Structures are given as structure tokens and as C-alpha cells.
Image (spheres, rainbow, N blue to C red):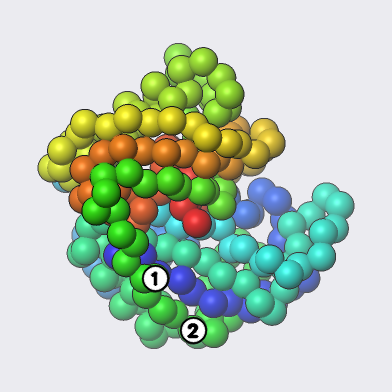
């Protein structure tokens, strides 16, 4: 399940370090409101014995905001997407948002204007072409890779298969990078992240493609990375 939250920002700009740096706290706060046990498990260890956390979000996106040098511009017309391939986790976030009038994203208050489920995507062909709205994070030998780097597709495929194993889904997959955006670096609570937006073709079982669409691509999806448009 994935859904969009229409929001209005209380400030005209957001500090860059809060764009992804505040995402994890927002997600865990929503889940904790409905089920503290799940929130603690995800935060402390991962999900059901796996270090992965099957939940994703986008950063707050403001398509009509005017660019301002050195800051992240906001506006009264923004959106945050969230989702999870685990119904129990997705239901927690959705139920929490249903009772919210606002979300505090770092120092910026986002007024909640509405929440709606995203349409179900059709992956019955066994092929998905995914465009991300935020950088995809992939690491090799403790170094972040960009989509044009050697091993990027290989490591992304490893991540896809790991997610499949975590969810008990068929893990056979093929990954092809079709396009990529510029290199981006973001500061978060535990250091920094480096990646780029990407357009990726993945051939896999339809149920796995559905799960990726609800979860995101690559690492640190709970921090807003790798969210699929």
C-alpha cells in the first residue's frame, strides 16, 4: 500500500539537512502512535529478524516552489508519499495520518490538507520501469555508487533480491539502469548520503515489483531515498 499526503508548509524554505534528515523521525512517530512495538522493532533492529526496514517515504516535494540558492524552497502546495509492502506497517501510518492536522518535518510544520491512496500499479507483465523522485542509494565496499559507476546495477539487484527474501517473495530479478540525474549529497542524523535519481528497468515477479513500488529502491528508504514516482 502507498499513499500521498497533500501538505502546506508553514515556512517558505526548509534547511537542506532536514529534507532527508527528518524523514526517519516522521515515519517512526506515525507508526509509534498506532503500534509502539512495531516502531521500536523497526528502529532498533529491523523487521522480523532482518536488518531491512520495509517502509518508504518521499521527502516533502513542492513542484511549484521557486528555486532559492542555498535552501530548499517550500510552498502551500506540496506532497509527501509514504508506503510499505507490509500491510500492518502501512495501516499504522495511514491510520495515524487520518487523525493528523499537521506533520512536523524538522523545524517546518506541514499542514495536512488531505490523504489519498495511490492507484494500484499494473506489473502483471513482470517488467517495471521505475523513475525515482529522490536519489537511489547503493553501496559497494562501503562506498556510495552513482548509477553510471561499475557495480551499481549489480548492487541494486542484490538489494532487490534481499528485499524479496525479506518478504518471502521470488527473488529472481534483472536490473537495467536507463537514465540518471546528477550526483546529490545529503546530511542526515547518522552522517551523509550520496546518490542520484534514476530510471531503472526491473524484470521480476509481479508481486516483487508491487512491493518495490510500495517500498522504494536501494538503501535508506525510511529516510526518503529511492522513492518511486
| Residue 173 placement (x, y as % from top left) | 27, 32
Residue tagged by mark 2? 114
| Residue 130 placement (x, y as % from top left) | 45, 47
Can you see residue 197? yes
Of 137 and 44, nearer the camera is 137
Numbered tag placed on residue 182 in the rendering: none
| Residue 47 placement (x, y as % from top left) | 22, 46
Q: Nearer the viewer, mark 2 or mark 1?
A: 1
| Residue 68 placement (x, y as % from top left) | 85, 58
**Taking 11 as reference, is 139 above or below it?**
above
Residue drawn 36% across and 71% down? 119
**Taking 205 as reference, is 104 above or below it?**
below
Q: Residue furthest front?
A: 125
Residue tagged by mark 1? 118
Residue drawn 36% across and 53% down? 213
User: Is residue 15 toward the left or the right of residue 51 in the image?
Assistant: right
Element carrying mark 2 = strand
Q: How many marks overall?
A: 2
Of 9 and 125, nearer the camera is 125
Q: Residues within 10 Å of mark 1 (few under 14, many from 20)?
A: some
Amino acid at each position: 500500500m502507498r499513499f500521498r499526503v497533500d501538505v502546506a508548509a508553514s515556512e517558505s524554505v526548509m534547511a537542506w539537512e532536514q529534507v532527508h534528515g527528518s524523514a526517519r523521525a516522521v515515519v517512526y512517530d506515525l507508526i509509534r502512535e498506532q503500534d509502539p512495538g512495531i516502531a521500536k522493532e523497526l528502529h532498533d533492529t529491523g523487521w522480523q529478524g532482518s536488518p531491512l526496514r520495509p517502509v518508504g517515504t518521499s521527502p516533502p516535494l513542492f513542484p511549484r516552489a521557486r528555486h532559492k540558492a542555498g535552501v530548499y524552497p517550500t510552498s502551500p502546495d506540496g506532497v509527501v508519499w509514504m508506503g510499505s509492502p507490509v500491510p500492518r506497517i502501512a495501516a499504522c501510518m495511514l491510520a495515524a495520518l487520518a487523525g493528523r492536522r499537521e506533520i512536523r518535518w524538522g523545524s517546518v510544520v506541514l499542514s495536512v490538507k488531505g490523504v489519498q491512496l495511490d492507484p494500484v500499479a499494473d506489473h502483471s507483465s513482470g517488467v517495471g520501469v521505475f523513475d525515482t523522485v529522490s536519489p537511489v542509494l547503493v553501496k559497494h565496499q562501503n562506498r556510495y555508487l552513482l548509477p553510471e559507476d561499475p557495480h551499481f546495477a549489480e548492487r541494486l539487484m542484490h538489494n532487490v533480491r534481499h528485499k524479496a527474501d525479506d518478504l518471502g517473495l521470488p527473488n529472481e530479478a534483472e536490473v537495467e539502469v536507463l537514465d540518471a540525474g546528477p550526483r546529490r549529497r545529503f546530511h542526515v542524523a547518522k552522517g551523509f548520503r550520496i546518490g542520484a535519481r534514476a530510471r531503472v528497468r526491473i524484470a521480476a515477479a509481479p508481486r516483487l515489483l508491487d512491493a518495490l513500488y510500495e517500498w522504494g529502491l536501494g538503501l535508506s528508504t525510511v529516510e526518503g531515498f529511492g522513492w518511486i514516482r
